[in-house]
Image (cartoon, rainbow, N blue to C red):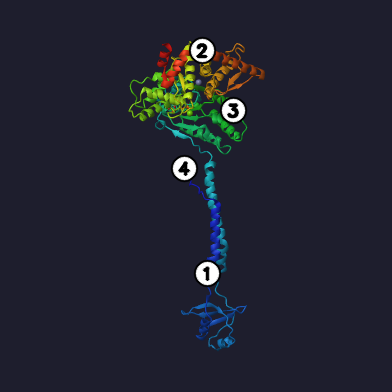
Amino acid sequence: MPEPKRPTKKPLIFYYLISLLLVFLINAVILPMFMRDQVTAVDYSVFLQAVEENRVTQVELSSDGQEIMYIATDRHGQLQPYVTVAMPDPNLIERLRATDSNIQFSRIKPTQISPILTYLFSLLFPILLIFGLGRLFSRQLQQRMGNAMSFGKSSAKIYVEAQTGKTFADVAGQDEAKEALTEIVDFLHNPGKYAGIGATLPKGALLVGPPGTGKTLLAQAVAGEADVPFFSISGSEFVEMFVGMGAAKVRDLFKQANEKAPCIVFIDEIDTIGKKRGDGGFSGNDEREQTLNQLLTEMDGFDSRKGVVLLAATNRPESLDPALLRPGRFDRRIPVELPDLGGRTAILKVHAAKVKMEADVDFEAIARATAGSSGADLANIINEAALRAVRMGRQRVKQEDLEESVEVVIAGYERKNAVISPQEKELIAYHEIGHALVAAKQTNSAPITKVTIVPRTSGALGYTMQVEEDERHLMSKEDAMNRIAILTGGRAAEELVFNTATTGAANDIEQATKLARAMVTRYGMSEQFGMVAFESVINPYLGGDASLTCSSETSAAIDKEIIRLVKKGQEKAINILKDNLDKLHELSRELLKRETLTGQEFMHILES
Ligand code: ADP
Ligand code: MG
Ligand code: ZN
C-alpha cells in the first residue's frame, strides 16, 4: 500500500484568507485595468486638434456636462474612444459642423469587455476557487481519516526465522516452558505424527509469569525454531479509537494466519484485551469487549489441525476472562517463573557469552546473591559489569565488576561525594552493625556477606547483605521471626547506644510490618488465629498486593497481633545486642574506619 501523503499542517483559515486576498486583488486591480484600457484620457487641445484634422467621428457630452467623450481615428487609422474635460466653448458645435467630416452627435458606447467575461472574473472565479479548495480539503481529510477508517488492515507483522534471530539456546533456565513449547514446534514440523494417533494439538498456549522472566523471549525463540511464519502483535495494538476496529483487526489477523498456515500467532500482553468482561465501566469498554468477543469467536472458528498455533503472554492471568481460559481456547498454561539458583547461573552464562570475561568468574556466587531476580535483571547485571570494566579501563570483566553491579541493580550506584556528618556516619555504622550482629548471633540465619555504610543512589545510607548458602523454597515461622528481629536490629542499636530513634529505620519497619502481617493473614503463623486466611493476593506476579477480607473487629485484632509479633522480634534484637555490647562497639568502630566490611572480616572480628 503506498504511504498516504502527509496531510498539510496549515489550518483551513490560512487557505481561505489566501483566496479572499485573490478575489480582492482581482476586483480592485485587474478588472479596472481592463476597463481603463478602453478609454484614453486626453487634453482638450488634443481633442481640438483631432477635430481640426477631421479625425473625429462621434462626440458626446456626459450627462453632468463635465466630460466630452469622442471617437477618433488614431495614428494607425484605427477608431479609438477618448475622454477629455469639457471646456466652456460655446462655438464648439459650430466648429464641429464646420469640419467636412460627418460627425455624429450620438451616444458613445466604449467597447466594453463582454459582460460574460466580467461576470466570470468577478463571480465565477472565486466560486471556482473555493470549490476547488473544498475538494482539496475533503480529499486530505479522507486521507487522514483513511488510516483510521481502513477496516481490515491489521498491523500484524510477519516474523520469520531470520528476523527474530532467537532460538531456544538464547533462553536459559526455563526448561519446563521450553519442553512444552518444543512439542508445539514439533507438531508444526511433523503434523502427520500426531494426526496418525488422532491427537490434536492444543489451540492455544498461555505464557504466564512475572515481568522480565523471558515470556516474550520464549515466543520469539519458538518462532526461530519452528521455521514457520510468525505473527506477532501486542494486545495494546488492538485498542483503537473507534468501536469495532479492534474486532476488525482480530478478524484480519486470523484471516492472514489461516492463509499462511502452518504458522504461529503470538499476542503479547493479552490482558490488555482479555480482561474479564463486565468489570470497570469506563468508556472504551465496549470496544474491548467487542475485540475480546471477536477473539473468542475466531479461536473457536479455526482448526488447529491446519496448524495455526496461538501463543499469548501475560503477567496478570488472574484478570483474564474465564472464557478465554476454558479448554479449546488457551487450554495450555505454561508458567514462566522466576529462575532458581541453577536457572540464574544458566541465564548469567548465556548473557556472559556475549561479553569478554575473565576465565575464573564464579557465576554461581553471583546467582546465589541474586535470589528473586528475573532474567531481565540478570541480563542487566552482566551489562552493568561490562560497563564498569570499561570505566575501569579493563579489557575483560572481573568477578568484582559483577559483585559491584549486583549492588548497583539492588541499591543503585555509589554516591561517592555525598556529604554525611561524622555524627550521622557513626549512627549509620551502629545501625548496620545492629542488623548484622542480630543476624550473626541467631541460629539458622543466612551468613553475612557484606556490611557497608557507603551511600547509594537509591537513598540507602548503608546496608547489610546476607546470602543464603543454598536455595530456599520455604520459610518457617522461626525464619520469619528471625527476619523480623534482624530488621528491627538497626533501630535497636540506635536506641541502645544513642538512646534515640531516626528516620533511617523507616524501610526496615515497613518490611517487618509487611512480613508480620503476612504471617498472621496468609501464612497461618499466629496461635491466636490459626490457619485462617484473611487476605487474598490480587496479582501474584506484579508485587502481590493483597486485599483484606474480614470483619472490622477481626481487622483490629489482626493489627494487635502484628504489633505483638514485631515487638517480640524487637525485644529479641535488643537482648542480643545487650549481650554483645562490646562487639557492637568494636565492629561499629571498625566499620566507621573502613566503610565496608566483607563477611569474612566481620566474622573474624566477631569471633576474635
Ligand atoms: P517478559 O517475560 O516480561 O516478556 P522478556 O522476554 O521481554 O520478559 O525478557 C526481557 C529480557 O530479559 C530478554 O530480552 C532477555 O535478555 C532477558 N531474559 C529474560 N529471561 C531470560 C532467560 N530465561 N534466559 C535468557 N535471557 C532472559
Ligand atoms: Mg514481554
Ligand atoms: Zn536498617
- Residue at 55% of width from left, 75% of height from top? 110
Whole-angstrom CA distance, mark 1 to mark 3, is 76 Å
Residue 34's tag is 1
Query: SS for tag 4?
Result: loop
Instruction: Determine crowd level at label 4: few under 14, some 14-19, many 20+ residues with C-alpha closer than 10 A.
Output: few
Please tell me the numbered disc located at residue 1: 4
Q: Are marks 1 and 4 in contact (CB under 8 Å)?
A: no
Spatial CA span between label 1 and label 2:
112 Å
Residue 133 is tagged as: none
Dots 1, 3 in contact, CB < 8 A:
no
Which is more toward the observer, 287 or 563?
Answer: 563
Q: What residue type is labelled 1?
A: Phe
Among the two numbered marks 1 and 4 on one chain, the one whose residue lies closer to the N terminus: 4
Q: Is mark 1 on a helix, strand or loop?
A: helix
Q: Which amino acid does label 4 sit on?
A: Met
- 413 over 41 or under it: above or below: above
Q: Do the residues labelled 4 and 2 touch (CB within 8 Å)?
A: no
Q: Is mark 3 on a helix, strand or loop?
A: loop
Q: Using the numbered discs, state the Cα–Cα distance from disc 4 to disc 2 in whole angstroms.
A: 79 Å
Q: How many labels does the image show?
A: 4
Q: In this view, does 159 lie above or below 452?
A: below
Mark-to-mark CA distance, 4 and 3: 36 Å
Classify mark 3 as within 8 Å of ligand 2 or not, answering yes or no.
Answer: no
The residue to which callout 3 is attached is: 276
Viewer-side label of 1, 2: 2
For discs 4 and 2, the disc positioned in front in the rendered view: 2
